[in-house]
Amino acid sequence: MTVRRLLVPAGLCAALLTSCLLGLAALLFAPDLALATTTMPKQVTCPVCEKEITVYVISSTNTFGGADFDLCSHAAGTEPRLLRVWSCPRCWYSRWSGKFEESVEKAVKKRILEDLEPEVPLGEVKSQTDIPGFVKFGLAGTILEWEEVEPRELADHWIEAAWAVRCEGWDSLAPLKADPELSEAKRALDKKLSGWQREHPGGEQDFWRCRADLAAADLYLERAGEEGRDPVDAALHRLIAASWLRSRGENHRAAPVFKSLHDDESLPLAIRATAVSMLESISRERGFQERFLAALARAQESGRIDEENDGSLSCIAGETCRFLGRDKEARDHLVHALEVASRPTWVDKFGRAALERIKGSRSRAADAEGQPQDTE
Ligand SMILES: [Zn+2]
């Protein structure tokens, strides 16, 4: 699976908008069908240790969850991205589903059997779904690095890994869900918000679900700051707002909110524990984003990257750097993308919009601090 196949070439905007509209129509008329990501179990043999394992092949899915500004797509319902890398629970050999059963070079096989370990210790693994996405993608990426595949292929893998962590991020809300009082309060807030979102569908733009979530986050941050609000209620508002920002990749904004919630010892433990889980999830995503940027830099230095990929991956790198709070680097990637001669046509619109977003975030930061914008 390459990033290129996930992008919608030349028609990202129209196609995405169409899929969102179709998604809405489908949701209205056939909610169960529309939400389904369906899978089929399949027996495969690990090519390293020869264990027979059951994996899940995706037979249908959707992109009704919209796309984030770095083009990470979301499904409504089960997130298929997390099922696309398979791991052997005995030797931890891991690879993209379509290539899982291909033969593995002898030296790499030996290294897998001797050195490969998941990033965190796992309990008994009965099913592929017992293995977190960040573990599967991390193992598969390590093997690709041992195999010394082309840096461009590694870049594709690591950005998908970052997106898998983001899509998995909702699991980090578990501590909150475990607290009956707070989870009830959150449900009530969600209900209020769903009314607000229906009235503010986010306009005609390509990333409208993303825009709606970000607008909702702003609304909740504003409400959290209203005078006279109970401190726990305010903290819950900020936690939910930061979770939306995090789910759309805007980690440079989400992380400071989670950090301040974690640091406030007067807050209920469930809120602080949720904030910690979210910070861990952000940190894992950041690790994969850094590997993506490093692999892309190597691909560009080696000159072994075609212009189409150079243009599209540089756009994604621009947004990735913005998410990491590194605006100057973000701008350099976007300017480069707009200079690539045979770039895909969507890069122009996307690149210019991304440059505007950087300006917007700088002026917001300057407003917040009451300082003039710097002109870096
Ligand atoms: Zn195995």
Image: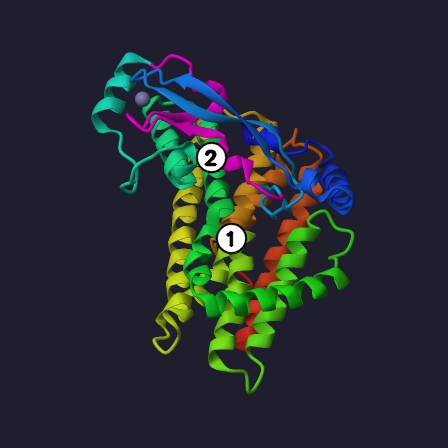
Q: With respect to residue 220, does 332 lie above or below?
A: above
Amino acid tagged 1: Phe
Task: Say whether residue 231 is left or right of residue 64.
Answer: left
The residue tagged 2 is 296
The magenta-colored residue range is 76-104
Of badges 1 and 2, nearer the viewer stands 1
Identify the secondary structure beneath mark 2: helix
Identify the secondary structure beneath mark 1: helix
Which disc number belongs to residue 35? none
Q: Residue at x 56, y 50 (%)?
A: 331
- In front of the other: 6 or 315: 6
Magenta span has 100? yes
Of the four image quadrants, the one with ligand 1 is top left
Magenta span has 196? no
Q: Residue at x 45, y 51 (%)?
A: 171
Q: Quadrant of residue 101?
A: top left
Mark 2: give few (<14), some (14-19) or many (20+) Cα within 10 Å. Answer: many
Q: Is mark 1 within 8 Å of ligand 1?
A: no
Q: Is mark 2 within 8 Å of ligand 1?
A: no
- In front of the other: 25 or 69: 25
